[in-house]
Every structure is written in structure tokens, then in C-alpha cells.
Amino acid sequence: MSSEAVKIRVLAVDDHPLLREGVAALIADEADIALVGEAADGREAVDLFRRLRPDVTLMDLQMPNVNGIEATTTIRAEFPDARIVVLTTYTGDVQVPLALKAGASGYLLKNAIRTELLSTIRAVHAGRKVLSSEITFALASHSAGQALSPSETRVLALIADGLSNKEIAARLSMTEEAVKGQIKNILAKLDARDRTHAAVIGLRNGII
């Protein structure tokens, strides 16, 4: 078997040519990794994946026409074993669970490509999930927010709107004591210092 046959075959998907060139340059000298294709949007990515069947796909999230999450969903529906690493500049919590739900095996910030890309490709190819430290933090924040009950989420939204406990109680037909209990739970679940901090976390993480 030739050395070429055992290389990890990689497809790079990003609408910025410079980023694809950077990925190609990083992979070029690796004995165990080969770049087999490049795509500029999600639609092209799906077509190339069908033709090339790469071992690992590097998938940008924000692209014209078909975005990375849609492309990942389509690829994984047809090829459940596809291993996809999402590349993005965003740490927003909304993107993290969507990418993982779509089937991404790894999630890497673009500013970490130079230092973490090669190890991520190898780890994902070996069957492991890989998340950058920033993404892990964002995912934890999202998970915390998801733990809020519907009632607690409504209370948090009214806190963010500037309502007092008395006003929240009147709006939701609750007692003030019940509102205080809800707020206590919210602060604990979000690890927030106070009402204002909880509102900031809720808005930042897309909970409200």
C-alpha cells in the first residue's frame, strides 16, 4: 500500500480563498494528511463530498447560498459516518449546538487554525469529538441556559426588560415570593451574581 493511500483525505470548505490557501499550506508538508478538494459554499461542498468521499471535511459556517450547518446536515443525512470539523470566527452559543446537532465532530475557531488544525483533523479522523476551549465554554453556557424552566425563562426576560419583582409578579399572576424563588433558581443555574448579570448572560447566550 502506498503512503498516499493511508493519508487522511481532507475537503476544505470556505468562501474565503485566503483561508483555503492557509489550510492547504498547513496540510502540504504533512506526511499523513492530503487536501483532496476545495469548495466555496455549502452547495459545492455537498457535491464535492459525494464525489470525493473525504475522511475529514473542514466546513465554514457563514457562507453564501447554502451555509455550513445546512451542508453538514445534508452530508450527514446521506453519509452518517461523515466526519466534519466546523470552522468559524464566532463563539456564539446558537452556532455551537446547531453545528453539533447537525453532526459536526469538531468545532474550531479560525484564529486557532495555525496551532490546532492538524491535531484536530487527526483526532476527528480517529473518531473523537474536538471542541476548542472557547467553544466548550460557550456550549456550557448554552447548556446552563437550557436548564431554565419555561417559567424561569419568562421571568428572566422580564428582568431584562427592567421590571421589578412586584411588576413581574403582576405580569405573570404570581406572588412576589414565587418570583423571588424563581430568581434565586435563575441566579444559581446561570452562575450569575445578581439580576443584571443574569439578564446579560441570558441576552448574550440567546436564552431570551
Image: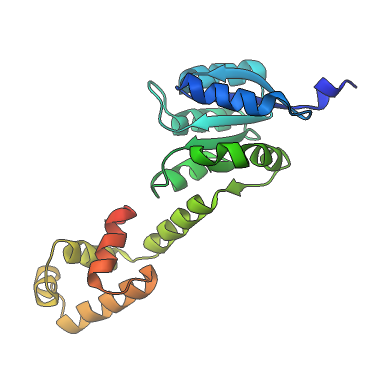
x and y percentages locating residue 80 in the rendered image = 62, 34
One can see residue 71 in this view: yes
Q: Where's the N terminus, which quadrant?
A: top right
Please tell me whether residue 150 is drawn above or below residue 121 in the rendered image. below
The x and y percentages for residue 119 are 68, 41
Q: How many marks?
A: 0
Residue for point 56% across, 48% down: 131
Residue 77 in view (yes/no) = no
Q: Quadrant of residue 9?
A: top right
Q: Quadrant of the C terminus?
A: bottom left
Which sits in the foreground, 208 or 4? 4
Q: Position of residue 65 (x, y in %)?
A: 38, 20
Query: In the displayed structure, would residue 93 be above or below residue 189?
Result: above
Q: Residue at x 44, y 43 (%)?
A: 98
Which percent across, then down, holds residue 102? 50, 39
Residue 98 relative to residue 25: left or right? left
Identify the residue shown where x is 50% and y is 33%: 73
Measuring 53% from the left and 18% from the top, which residue is drawn there?
Answer: 39
